[in-house]
Amino acid sequence: MNDFNSIADALRDARTVGVASHLRPDADALGSTIAFALWLESTGKKVIALNEEGATSKFRYLPRHELVAMPPETPIACDAFVALDTSVKNRLGTVLKAIPKDIPLLNIDHHVSNEQYGSLNHVDPSAPATGQILVEFFQHIGAPISRDMASNLFAAISTDTGSFQYEGTNERTFAAASHLISRGVDVAALSRDMYDCHPRRRFELLRHALNTAEFHSGDRIASFALPLAVARELRVLPEDNEGIIDHLRAVEGVEAAVFFEELEDGNIRVSARSKIPEVDVCKVCREFRGGGHKMASGARIPGTLDQVKRDFLKALDHEIHNRN
């Protein structure tokens, strides 16, 4: 793992820097992207911030979210490129077309399954959010964190730790959050925007999920599926799915929850969440060329919804009944 000084050195002489995060972004991905872009701007650099979906409407509460654009079809002109919160290079999606060849690619991430694809890699699985890594990076190099940067980074950390509940939340996490609050984060207002402003269509999706949820393996696994036809009927957007799975994981006795989403491209998007450290959903997702964290992982699997459900649930059942 490269140290923070190496990151700063790699960017010092760059005049234009590209910054991006994974497709289907969450607040850690976009918040980290915006905060890093704002820091680069503060040092006098030109920044091109990208995401396959741009800054979706769900994240309009993130200060300066308008910085994040959808990628062009051809490579951008830049001297270095930074991939944030992205464990596998192809998870950048269409952003890959925008990255020039033969420039430094910096990979900054916290997923244990990261494939170390950068010319410089800083991957810290002990950090529960990429936002925490960036706070520690800025502190290490003595970079001031503006109020807008702080709000983005707090959103990144808060959401990726489940409001500071998940495994991996540690003393460093609270120290980072405390520092961000000292930089002007309005925790109450930001939390309302993050957790209490969902569109009606998301409620309808939640209703569907609760009405169609299934339980397996002696009620130790809970799952629900979203067929493409239902998604169209409910008019849900991809961003509406985040957090729905947590309602299933919260059921007493459930050790792991899985969400199966049928995609337009013929793949099934699988999101898996574990409630206890003994159930390693990353291990299961890796069997299907996915990855993430031990207790929160995903994969995109070709096949029909029924077949992918059957295969994945069989593998997850094996993990639950054969864990050490």
Image (cartoon, helix red, strand yellow):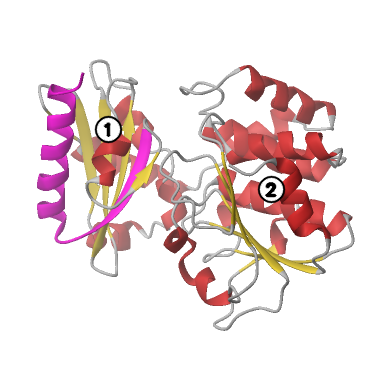
Q: Position of residue 231 (x, y in %)?
A: 31, 58
User: Does 97 sit left or right of 100 as displayed?
Assistant: left
The reply, left or right, for residue 8 in relation to residue 120 is: right
Kind of residue sitting beneath label 2? Leu
Query: Does 304 lie within the magenta span?
Result: yes
Disc 1 element: strand
Q: Earlier in the sequence, mark 2 or mark 1?
A: 2
User: Residue visible at 27% across and 44% down?
Assistant: 285
Span of residues in magenta: 296-324
Between 163 and 144, the one nearer to me in the picture = 144
Amino acid type, callout 1: Ala
Frontmost residue, 244 versus 157: 157
Q: Residue 162: horizontal and vertical position, in percent?
A: 50, 28
Q: Is residue 215 visible?
A: no
Q: Which mark is residue 257?
A: 1
Give above or below for 263 relative to 285: below
Disc ID at residue 62: 2
Count numbered badges in the picture: 2
